[in-house]
C-alpha cells in the first residue's frame, strides 16, 4: 500500500511527547536536548506518510488483539494504526518502560 498517507497525532500521543520533553528537561537541566529529541521524533514520523506498512506490528498489543505498528526512534517507539489512507499516531513510548504501559 505505497502512496501518500495523511499523518494524524492523537491527544494522547501529544501528551506523551510533552512528558518526554519535560522528563528530559528535568534530567538534563536544559531544554536543548529535550527539543532535539521531540524534533527527531516528529521528523522520523514523516516516513509513515509513504511507508507505514514497512514497520512491524507491536507484539504486546497484538497479544491483546489490537492491531498497531511501531517505528523505533532512539529509545522511543512511535505507536500507530492505519485507517484507510490515514496513519494515526496513538502513543510515543519509552522502550525502557514495561510494554504494559503502552496506552494504545
Image (cartoon, helix red, strand yellow):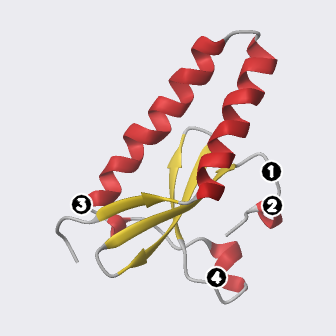
Determine crowd level at label 4: few under 14, some 14-19, many 20+ residues with C-alpha closer than 10 A: few
Q: Using the rendered view, name the quadrant where residue 18 is placed.
A: top right
For the residues labelled 4 and 3, the Cα–Cα distance comes to: 23 Å
- From this view, report whether residue 101 is shown above or below residue 27: below
Residue of label 2: 101
Say if mark 1 contacts mark 4, CB within 8 Å.
Answer: no
Residue of label 4: 62
Residue, far left: 3
Residue of label 1: 97
Between discs 4 and 3, the one toward the N terminus: 3
Determine crowd level at label 2: few under 14, some 14-19, many 20+ residues with C-alpha closer than 10 A: few
In percent of width and height, residue 52 lies at 35, 66
Determine crowd level at label 3: few under 14, some 14-19, many 20+ residues with C-alpha closer than 10 A: some
Between discs 3 and 2, the one toward the N terminus: 3
For the residues labelled 1 and 3, the Cα–Cα distance comes to: 29 Å
Please name the residue shown 72% across and 24% down the image: 24
Between discs 2 and 4, the one toward the N terminus: 4
Please name the residue shown 80% across and 50% down the image: 97
Amino acid at each position: 500500500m505505497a502512496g501518500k498517507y495523511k499523518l494524524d497525532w492523537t491527544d494522547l500521543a501529544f501528551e506523551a511527547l510533552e512528558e518526554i520533553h519535560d522528563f528530559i528537561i528535568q534530567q538534563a537541566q536544559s531544554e536543548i536536548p529535550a527539543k532535539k529529541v521531540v524534533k527527531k521524533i516528529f521528523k522520523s514520523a514523516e516516513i509513515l506518510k509513504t511507508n507505514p506498512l514497512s514497520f512491524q506490528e507491536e507484539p504486546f498489543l497484538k497479544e491483546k488483539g489490537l492491531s498497531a505498528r511501531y517505528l523505533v526512534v532512539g529509545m522511543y517507539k512511535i505507536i500507530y494504526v492505519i485507517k484507510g489512507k490515514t496513519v494515526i499516531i496513538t502513543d510515543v513510548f519509552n522502550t525502557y518502560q514495561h510494554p504494559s504501559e503502552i496506552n494504545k
